[in-house]
Amino acid sequence: MGGHSRQFEDLGGDLLIKLRLLDLRAAALCRLAPALAEGFEELVHQARNLASALRTQNCRSRTVPSPMPEITRREFLKLGAAGTAGMALVPLANPLGFDVAAAKKRALDLRISGAKEVHSICPYCAVGCALIAYTKEANGKTQLLQIEGDPDSPVNEGRLCPKGASAMQLATSVRRVEAPMYRAPGSTSWEKKDWDFVLDKIAQNIKASRDNTFVAQDANGNVVNRTEGIAFAGGAAFSSEEGYFATKLMRGLGLIHLEQQARV
């Protein structure tokens, strides 16, 4: 092993840091398997001697070369095996001395303690994953505390995709739009309107578009009674019955551009 003395100092420092971690693994191993721990501690001891020698070598002189301690190939492989064994023990022994997962579960239980449990369905796609929402009354308002998958549902068995897991933001996001917004033609700003105004406006626009684009006969004289100026996209959370009803309604208006977003 040769090279600049600065590199040996860095190597010795890094090795000492790793040895501190290995000491924690060795202590955990002593509790789990005392027979294995003895050999493990011997490897850590050899590695500690090597790290001390590297740092001592650098402290002697930064300019005058001096002999370095030799390390055999077998000893190097032993040190590598010791580090690998120490890392493998991490899932088996917790150096902190307590179960972090249990502590996190306890915090969640306290957060939803006394909350009302409400069952619902994820609104995003056609899978229809079941949700459990935990709510609590605070200052005369219903506060949403937590949303999670319903473990009793045969559809998702408590699991949620990333979109479903973030469904709580539909109710709690600061960017949530809580009322219909309307921007008049040529305007640069949005206005807050009530639902009566919005539904009337939609009906008027559908009627005007249908009248302007309605085709009674095609170029060959065939009766088609269709409108090509309106398209319809069904919601992803439509049930089969809702999709059937929406399609019949749109066909009755003469629409031919239909799509159902019944997918993830």
Image (cartoon, grey):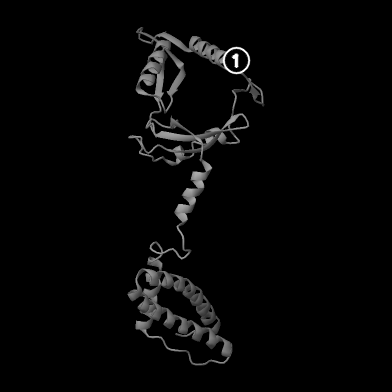
- Classify mark 1: helix, strand or loop: helix
Q: Is residue 81 above or below residue 154?
A: below
Provide residue 1's location: percent of width, then percent of height. 44, 85
Tell me the kind of residue under disc 1: Phe
Which of the image's four quarters has the C terminus? top left
Residue at the spot 46% in from the left edge and 63% down from the top edge: 97
In terms of depth relative to the viewer, which is nearer, 158 or 17? 158
Label 1 neighbourhood size at 10 Å, few (<14), some (14-19), many (20+)? few
Provide residue 169's location: percent of width, then percent of height. 53, 36
Q: In the rendered image, which quarter is residue 26 located in?
A: bottom left
Residue at the spot 36% in from the left edge and 19% down from the top edge: 241
Q: Is residue 108 above or below residue 175?
A: below
Q: Is residue 125 above or below residue 66?
A: above
* Farthest front residue in view: 114
In terms of depth relative to the viewer, which is nearer, 120 or 258? 120
Q: In the rendered image, which quarter is residue 126 located in?
A: top left
Provide residue 106's location: percent of width, then percent of height. 48, 49
Please give the count of numbered marks on the rendered protein.
1
Provide residue 65's location: percent of width, then percent of height. 53, 91
In terms of depth relative to the viewer, which is nearer, 170 or 149? 149
Residue at the spot 42% in from the left edge and 88% down from the top edge: 70
In terms of depth relative to the viewer, which is nearer, 214 or 26? 26
- Residue wearing tag 1: 197
Residue at the spot 39% in from the left edge and 72% down from the top edge: 30
